[in-house]
Every structure is written in structure tokens, then in C-alpha cells.
Image (spheres, helix red, strand yellow):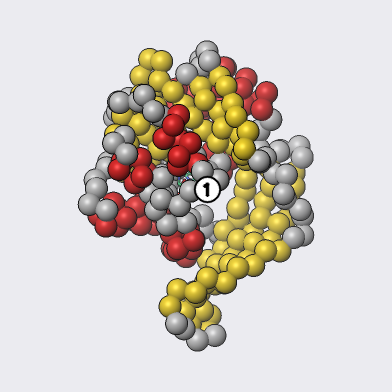
Amino acid sequence: MFIEYGELSTLFYETTKPVGTELDGDITAYKEHLGATTGKILEAGVGTGRMLIPLLQAGFDVEGVDISSQMLSQCRKNLKAHQLTAPLYEQDLTQLALPTKYEAIIMPTGSFCLLPRNQALQILRAFKAQLVEGGALIIDSILPQDFTVGEVYQRTLPLAEQTGILFTSTSLEMDWVKQQTVALHRYEKLEQGTLVQTELSRFVLAWYGIEEMTMLLQAVGFTSVAHSINETLVTFYAN
Ligand SMILES: C[S@@+](CC[C@H](N)C(=O)[O-])C[C@H]1O[C@@H](n2cnc3c(N)ncnc32)[C@H](O)[C@@H]1O
């Protein structure tokens, strides 16, 4: 019934956060965390390559995996435009199985919170299995401090003189028991005031307590777990 990271959502993401856009300095921070890494790195939920491409340009050997064919297609275009190549896999992280073992897996932008909460342990276990012995996992988790039920946020994004996207996010639910928020994301493409395309996404974001995520990471075999906090984003470093 809904579509996550479909055509309009991808266009909106690519236009508002083009390759290299820093979100609270995250690309710089990930480069620093990965500083000593020379082996293969996997970006889980690679999206359009916003972070992948600067990491490749900095000399890291990064591959990407994502469930959205539209986001991956944009990523391929962006790689080509930057005269770069990288293996990209279309795969659901709940079924992760890739041919390579990685020295590090990263999942920036709070994307881990998009994954089904009841499969978190299984996904973290699959991440661990996909790492070389002693490999590092770096993931962000978002705390829903700014979420208010009933709030409506709108943004108009011009694409050309007579074309644009009207984005409306309506905050629907804050489920304290399931620890998740639900918002309805509506992307409307307008041409000279006429609606030509609509895309609706049921945007579910889980959240994790810091102790909880630390214990989950330890439960799947990471012996060293640390975290840092930047506003509502918590970054976990595990190996
Ligand atoms: C917020 S975007 C982040 C993109 C990129 N990592 C960045 O930092 O710009 C989240 C990405 O996670 C992907 N994603 C969500 N659920 C997924 C799943 N179950 N398996 C694989 N990718 C998933 C989406 O398709 C989307 O491209």
C-alpha cells in the first residue's frame, strides 16, 4: 500500500542532500572513525551515495547494500558522474548475505532505526557474521526527542521553473511500548499547479535506549562497545 524510498522520495533525498552533504558533520566524523581501516567496508543502507562517494574519494574501499532499487539507481548515476565504481547490492538487510567479509560495516543517518525493531538482534548478528574477526560496526541511532503527534511539516522543493515537489510529513503515532514513531510522508509532484504524481510512505522509526543497544551489540558477540551523542543522534562503535 505504501512505498519506502520510491521514485519521488529518492528525487527529494538526492535534491535536498546531494553527494557530500554533511548532516551535522557526519561524513567527516565517519572518515575519522574509519581512519585506520584499509580493508573492505560495507555501507548498509547506502542510499544515493551521499556518504559512499566522499569515502571512496578519501581512499576507503567501500561497497554498498540497499533495499531500494530507486536509491541504488541514483547511487549508480552519482558514481558515474564522479567517475568512480563500487560494488552495490540490492538486498534487504533482514536477509543479509554477501560474498565478502568486511573490516568495517557502517550505517549512518540513523538508518538502523528504519529496520524492523523485532528483527534488530537478528540483523546485528548478521552484521557480525559479515565482519572479519575483530571487524568494527559503526551505527547511528536516533532518539525521538523532536517527535510530536499531530505535527505537520511541509516543504516545497522546486525542481525546474514550473515543476517541484511538495513534501508533507504528518506525525501519526508515538508508541512507547513498541518504541517506535510513525509518520505519513507524502510526496506530491506538481507541474504548473497540477498534481502529476503522488507517493506515500509510512515512515516508521524505532528507537533504542543506549543501554539497550549496548546490550544488543554485546549479545551478538561484540566485546568492546562505546558510543557518542550528538544532539538526538547516538553513534555506537563496536568490535
Ligand atoms: C536515510 S537513507 C540513508 C542513505 C545513506 N546511508 C546516507 O547516509 O545518505 C536510508 C536508506 O536505508 C535503506 N533501507 C531501509 N530499510 C532497508 C532494509 N531493510 N534493507 C536495506 N536497506 C534499507 C533505504 O532504502 C535508504 O536508502
Instruction: Give me the residue at 55% from left, 36% from top.
Output: 140
Residue 55 visible in the picture: yes
Ligand 1 within 8 Å of the CB at mark 1: yes
- Is 112 placed left or right of 142 in the picture? left
Q: Nearer the viewer, residue 150 or 237?
A: 237
Give the percent coordinates (x, y) of residue 203.
60, 53
- Is 82 placed left or right of 205 in the picture? left
Compared to residue 47, the image places residue 39 above or below, namely above
| Residue 27 occupies quadrant | top left
Q: Nearer the viewer, residue 59 or 239?
A: 59
Give the percent coordinates (x, y) of residue 196.
49, 79
Compared to residue 154, the image places residue 120 above or below, namely above
Label 1 sits on a secondary structure element that is loop
Instruction: Give me the residue at 66% from left, 41% from top.
Output: 232
Give the percent coordinates (x, y) of residue 195.
53, 80
Instruction: Give me the residue at 41% from left, 15% from top.
Output: 134
Instruction: Give me the residue at 76% from left, 53% from top.
Output: 148
Give the percent coordinates (x, y) of residue 192.
50, 86
Task: Identify the image quadrant of the N terminus.
Answer: bottom right
Residues packed near mark 1 inside 10 Å, few (<14), some (14 to 19) or many (20 plus) = few
Residue 119 visible in the picture: no
Q: Nearer the viewer, residue 87 or 138?
A: 138
| Residue 104 occupies quadrant | top left
Question: Residue beneath label 1, please?
Answer: 23
Q: How many marks?
A: 1
Which amino acid type corresponds to the residue marked 1 in the rendered image? Leu
Q: Nearer the viewer, residue 230 or 222?
A: 230
